[in-house]
Image: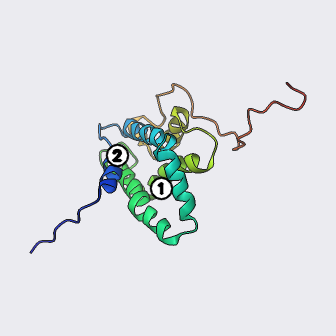
Amino acid sequence: MPATPRRRGALSSVWTSDLDYDDTGDVHADLREQFLRSSHVLSSPPIGPAYRALIAEAQGDPALRAAIHERFLVTVEQSTLRRITAAQDAGELTPGVDLAFAAEVLCGTLYYRHLLSTRPVGEEAVDGLLDMFMAAYGDPARGRLRSTTRGGPPAQYDGGDDDDQRPEQGEP
């Protein structure tokens, strides 16, 4: 008798359906759309604050930490890996390169900003991340190594000081 697929709960189906990438034939556009959509969800109630609290709780609860990793983070990374691997197979990305680490870096960068940084995860952050990804993995033969979304060079990293907006001493 064939195995019956395990029925997932409503929460699991929400996670997986929300993590599916479009495949329009333009990996840059598809990653951008997914990352901006995810960033909005992670920045807004109820998901954003609940996710931060869950991650904080997981630091002292190994079983919760493992469950979050297995049910959510692995799903996010695998979904991203499937999309970028399809792009590689279609010739959009450099052939023959293992993209597993790239998928982890793409996802991890956005989650790091949401969880630990005071910097926003908006269009500039997503475009800068995708500029780096395309510069590293874009197929030079296709001529698109850099985002054309913003019309300029990749965002410059200023060293990570979140206090950039403070006036110098003596300034009002």
Q: Amino acid at mark 2?
A: Asp
Could you tell whether 118 is left or right of 47 in the image?
right
Is 91 in front, or is 102?
Answer: 102
Quarter assignment of residue 67: bottom left
Q: According to the image, what is the colour scheme of the structure? A: rainbow
x and y, in percent, of residue 112 in the image: 57, 50
x and y, in percent, of residue 155 in the image: 60, 34
Give the structural element (helix, strand or loop) at label 1.
helix
Q: Residues within 10 Å of mark 1 (few under 14, many from 20)?
A: some
Mark nearer the N terminus (2 vs 1): 2
Q: Amino acid at mark 1?
A: Glu
Is 13 in front, or is 147?
Answer: 13
- Vertical placement of residue 156 versus 97, above or below: above
Residue at 47 percent of width and 55 percent of height: 104
Could you tell whether 95 is left or right of 152 in the image?
left
Cα separation between marks 2 and 1:
18 Å
Q: In this rendering, does residue 160 appear at all?
A: yes
Give the structural element (helix, strand or loop) at label 2.
helix
- For label 2, the residue is 18
Is 137 in front, or is 32?
Answer: 32
- For label 1, the residue is 104
Residue at 19 percent of width and 65 percent of height: 5
Residue lying furthest right:
170
